Amino acid sequence: MTYNKENVKEKKVRRKTMFESKTPNVEFRGKRKDDGKWIYGYYVEDREGPSILYRHPDGSLDRKKVIPKTAGQYVGIKDRHKKKVYTGDILKVYDSFLAIVENHYALQLGGSVKDFRISFDTMAEIEEFEIVGNVHENPELLSTGRW
């Protein structure tokens, strides 16, 4: 078949912006410096410090400064209640032990096996975990390893 102007429909291609992307691993959260509330979006750091860039419902962009230690990335998995899991979250796994989400794995807390790590691939397979808190709002869970 010969392609010419008559038999080929013109198709306008528009590039997606980073805010329209469906890539799950680029979302971050952090606690705002001004009011301490969680904000979700894209991590930006400049000479003024870390911020989260986000889109308002009307489509306009905004950015808010965040407390640096609270910034955490979505790791690409959801708990059994379909809540997104971020670095810094504390998970209850198999109703038997707690784990803290770090950059590439979840680390068991307070168990008999020291430094037991669970990959996110394994977490996605077992699906028997839920978010019970995070290191910023529930530090007491870190010391006991119990809920």
Image (cartoon, rainbow, N blue to C red):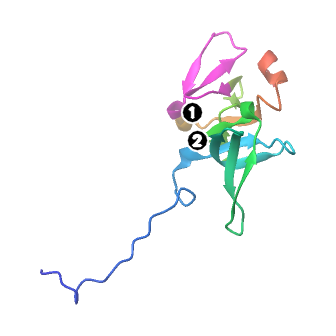
Q: Which mark is residue 20?
A: none
Rounded to the nearest angstrom, the CA distance separating label 1 from label 2 is 8 Å
Q: Are marks 1 and 2 in contact (CB under 8 Å)?
A: yes
Which of the 4 image quarters holds residue 130? top right
Mark 1 lies on residue:
123
**Is residue 127 positioned above or below 59 on the image?**
above
Is label 1 or label 2 in front? Answer: 2
**Sequence-wise, which precedes: disc 1 or disc 2?**
2
Q: Which residues are magenta?
A: 100-122
> Is 105 within the magenta?
yes
Q: Quadrant of the N terminus?
A: bottom left
Q: Residue furthest front?
A: 47
Residue 128 lies, in percent from the top left, at 63, 35
Out of 142 and 57, give the one closest to the viewer: 57
Give SS at disc 1. Answer: helix
Compared across the picture, whether 137 is left or right of 1 comes to right
The residue positioned 83% from the left and 45% from the top of the image is: 37
Q: In this orientation, which residue lies closer to the viewer: 147 or 41?
A: 41
Residue at the spot of label 2: 77
Q: What's the residue type where badge 2 is placed?
A: Ile
Residue 96, position as x, y percentages in the image: 71, 23
Residue 87 found in image quarter: top right
Quick one: label 1, few (<14), some, or many (20+) residues within 10 Å? some
